Image (cartoon, rainbow, N blue to C red):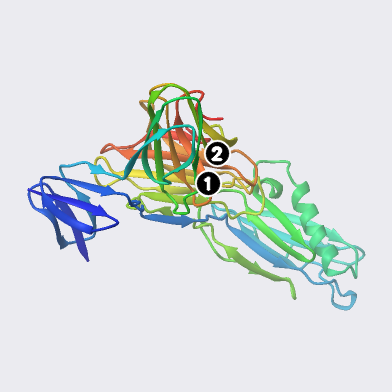
Amino acid sequence: MPKVTISSSKGLEQTSGSGFSVSDVELVRSTESITPVSASYTVTCIADDPADNLDDDSFVIYAQDGESYGIWFDVVGTAGGAPPEASTYELEVVFASGVNAEAVATAIKTAIDADTGTATAFGNMFTVIRAVNVLTIYVNETGALVTSAVVDSAAGILVALAADGSVGALDEDLECSLVSVGNEENTLNTTVALASGASVGQKKNIIFSSAANGEVNVGGALSNAGSAAVLLSLTTPGATAAGAACLVWNGSAWVVTNTSNVTVS
Amino acid sequence: MPKVIYSASKGLYQTSGSGVEIGDVAVIEASEAITSTGDTAAVAAYGTTVLTVTTGADLLSLAVNTNVGATKFIVATAVAGECTVTAVGKKQDGSALGTLVFNAVGEHAQLISDGTQWICVSAVTGVEA
């Protein structure tokens, strides 16, 4: 029977006996690195031109489930007042005639942030980051958008889908996955999926890196201390936050054998 | 795509498919035995280290392993003093890890690297410091 030994001096060699050993060198694991981000839109605002103002212009973005959210402009002192684009939910943004692009962006963010009256209100469905006249509007719900359309009738205001929320899945065949967070806001969470293992005894190590920009979760068929579970989470805020979970596939679930700074639920 | 298989009967061979499969034997990774004698020394940044602490307070160091997913297991099998292993990383509770202290037989720690630091995923109470 052959025995396989890998060493720094001889490389790979087979001798009599049985076994598979690696001596004086590191066994480097198969790894991947994944940085999931939430779905988001980029809105580049322009100044309001009194000669051709933005009154009644609008754009429509979508929540993860496909519900449409229309944002329309009401310029003070102008006629009109009805949103021109049909949408399930509507939000009026008021600003003065002739304001600059940054003021338009600020007005949109203020209106969205303030609208929190219901669970489906704009402020509860979206998180807005503003950089001068450019808004990044994150979709708070995790998962890929049902629709990736953007309806834009606001002349000059550029609205684009920046990320569709398709965060992908971990490669269950690789022994280690490094999962980081790509969102800009620490209230945004992302979840990536871990598929079932292929062989009993298959190992999977997951390293979580930096939850400063939102909670990162891994969802899959888990078994923790004898109970079924579905989610591994790194929830600790902080730019240097890190955690890890060690899993072994038992034929029907990933058994959580060790964790560090990770919750299992 | 080739699939590499080891079995005790055939040794190492390739078939169609992909992956590496080690059948009917355990994979024995690199290991070292360190008998600490009061000197400062480095433990390998991979595999298993078996500590024998002979006397006094010894100081060892565990360097960062830049390979994501690298694992390290340290266990003390004989202790007559105290051995401190310095390591940069995180404790299981997420706080900063500075040292691993071994002062009793059977104490152990298991760590995994994220490429920049060690994350302790298992340790006997009191080892992390």
> Please, what secondary structure does the residue beneath circle 2 have?
strand
Q: Is residue A85 in view?
A: no
Residue sitting nearer the eye, A81 or B50 = B50
| Subunit bearing disc 2 | B
Q: Residue A73: which numbered mark, if any?
A: none
Q: Which residue does the numbered mark 2 point to in the structure image?
A: B90
Is A213 left, or right, of B121 in this rendering? right
- Where is residue B102? Give x, y as percent: 47, 27
Location of mark 1 (residue): B117
Q: How busy is the neighbourhood of tag 1: few (under 14 within 10 Å), some, or many (20 plus)?
A: many
Amino acid at circle 2: Lys
The vertical placement of A146 against A220, above or below, is below
The image quarter in which residue A134 lies: bottom right
Q: Where is residue B85 in the image (x, y as percent from the top left)?
A: 50, 35
Which residue is at a point 32% across and 37% down the rendered structure image? A253
Percent of width and height locating residue B82: 49, 25
Mark pair 1, 2: CA separation? 8 Å
Secondary structure of the residue carrying tag 1 is loop
Q: Do the residues labelled 1 and 2 touch (CB within 8 Å)?
A: yes
- State which tag comes first along the sequence, 1 or 2: 2
Whole-percent x and y of residue B94?
57, 36
A42, B71: nearer the viewer: B71
Residue visible at 67% across and 65% down? A42
